[in-house]
Amino acid sequence: QVQVVESGGGLVQAGGSLRLSCTTSGLTFDENAMGWFRQAPGKERQWISCITHNAGRTYYADTVKDRFTISRDNAKNALYLQMNSLQLEDTAMYFCAAERYAWCTRSSQQQAYWGQGTQVTVSS
């Protein structure tokens, strides 16, 4: 059984930083691209970043580019999202997801597995 578990969310002031982590089990981690999505109340789930299976390529939504950094450690079956210069608009539930493929589709429909999410709240 595949499990995907996020951690690292919390309350932070605008301009601050947080680092999200995602660990997996039951998954051949280095065969899947991994991504982060987020969903704010009343809004659709939004793709924000993805990293290919071997960390060779990374992709970011324009809304987080140059502020967030995605990385992975295949030896630890772990995915990370370093979030800097956080803004009020970054407040959302953040989800880790395993793509069906080794490359990034950026599509929520192409994610094979999802975590339960970790809440990030940015205050003024």
Image (tube, rainbow, N blue to C red):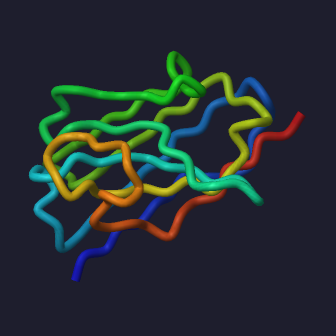
Horizontal and vertical percent position of residue 107: 38, 49
Res. 123 image quadrant: top right
Placement of 105 over or under 5, stated as above or below: above
Residue at the spot 22% in from the left edge and 83% down from the top edge: 1
Q: Which residue is depicted at the point 63% across and 31% down?
A: 17
Instruction: Classify residue 108 by image quadrant.
Output: bottom left
Give the quarter of the image for residue 41: bottom right
Image point (70%, 28%), residue name: 16
Q: Is residue 40 left or right of residue 84?
A: right
In the displayed structure, does residue 14 sit left or right of residue 31? right
Location of residue 35 in the rendering, given as x and y in whole percent from the top left corner: 36, 46
Q: Residue furthest bottom?
A: 1
Q: Is residue 35 left or right of residue 54?
A: right
User: From this viewpoint, which residue is outermost toward the top?
Assistant: 66
- Residue that sits furthest to the right in the current view: 124
Rendered location of residue 77, percent (x, y): 22, 55
Nearer to us in this view, 108 or 59: 108
In the rendered image, the vertical position of residue 52 relative to residue 74, given as above or below: above
> How many marks do you count on the picture?
0
Give the camera-side residue of 105 and 50: 105
Return the x and y of residue 56 as percentages of the image width and height.
Answer: 16, 27
**Residue in the image at 23% along x and 70% along y:** 25
The C terminus sits in image quarter: top right
The residue closer to the viewer here, 1 or 74, is 1
